[in-house]
Image (spheres, grey):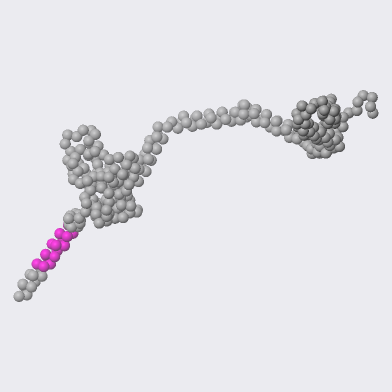
Amino acid sequence: MENRRTALRVGLFTLAGIFALLALIFFLSGSELNPGIPYETYFQESVQGLDVGTAVKFRGVTIGKVTDVGLVTAEYPPENLSDEQQKVYQLVVVRFRVDPKKIGHAEDVAQAIAHGLRVQIAPQGITGLAYVELSFVNPDQYPTITVPWTPQSTVIPSMPSTLNQVQDAIEQTMSSLSKVDLGKTIAQFTDLLTALDQEATTGDAHQAIANANLLLATLNEALKQADLPATTQSIRTLAGGPQTMKILAQLNDATAGLAKVSAALPAVVAQSESTIGHADETTADLQAQLGPILQDLKTTSANLRELTDSLKHNPAQLLDGAAPPLEGEH
């Protein structure tokens, strides 16, 4: 009886171990116990840090896991390859599954790829581990590739990791520097410095600087000798002097006289037109009215002529003051 119980316990323990082992195998192999939409991608760089079970993330959110990592030559054996096809078979294939519950309602994968959906290896801290990152980039910068085999799953194009891009940039820079003739460049730079030094000490540049210094010195001396305050005061005194005020008064009187004559002429003309039919009777009155006006016009013209002649013979009197005395006057 005791032996039967022992055998039953051993059998149950064995079955439990088998079931646990099968569950572990299914979990690690990404079987149907861990469903998801299968995808695959190809990398031209090292996939160090990736392994089965590695997280697949979209903008930091885990949406799936890696199910397989291998070489293209093992997954899709080549036959009669050309030189161009041999480069394609040097790729690494990475398969992964995406949980549809984690992405919800998303656009069609083909449209997403056309809009720039790409796969990239991203480092996970300083541990040396990595994960698969999905993101949208410029599709023209990282175009899709054509492979000579039939993929097992939908292919999402890849792009180089950030570390790989930095390494490529450094390699290109070093390659460019290695092509530069440093000795020749240094010699040309030395010649340029020598030419600049000669130009600054003995050439045209030196002469231009000397001329500029001489010009500044001349201007400074001229400003020191010029009595600007006295000149300004003289101009102010002349503008307010009696002779200037007298000339301005004469101009004002002449202008007023002309305005008076101009204002009276329309009335005279109107009267003349109204009395054309009675010329004999009104001639005396018209002459009596025109007499004073013509006399004022004559006087005004004489004043203007006198002022014009005075300014013509001595135009500086407007600024210098009274006109100089005529010959024989003291």
Work out whether 24 lies above or below 282.
below
188 magenta-colored: no
In the drawing, does residue 214 fall left or right of residue 284? left
- For the C terminus, the quadrant is top right
Work out whether 156 lies above or below 193.
below
Q: Which residues are magenta?
A: 11-25
Q: Residue at x 64, y 29 (%)?
A: 208
- How many numbered circles are shown? 0
In the drawing, does residue 180 fall left or right of residue 321? left
Q: Main secondary structure of the magenta part?
A: helix
Farthest-out residue, bottom: 1
Residue 202, given in percent of the width and then of the height, sits at 63, 27
Q: Residue at x 81, y 37 (%)?
A: 239
Work out whether 180 lies above or below 112.
above
Q: Residue at x 27, y 40 (%)?
A: 144
18 magenta-colored: yes
Residue 175, given in percent of the width and then of the height, sits at 38, 35
Can residue 317 be seen here? The reply is: no
- For the N terminus, the quadrant is bottom left
Where, by quadrant of the figure, is residue 246 drawn? Answer: top right
Where, by quadrant of the figure, is residue 81 drawn? Answer: top left
Can residue 145 be seen here? The reply is: yes
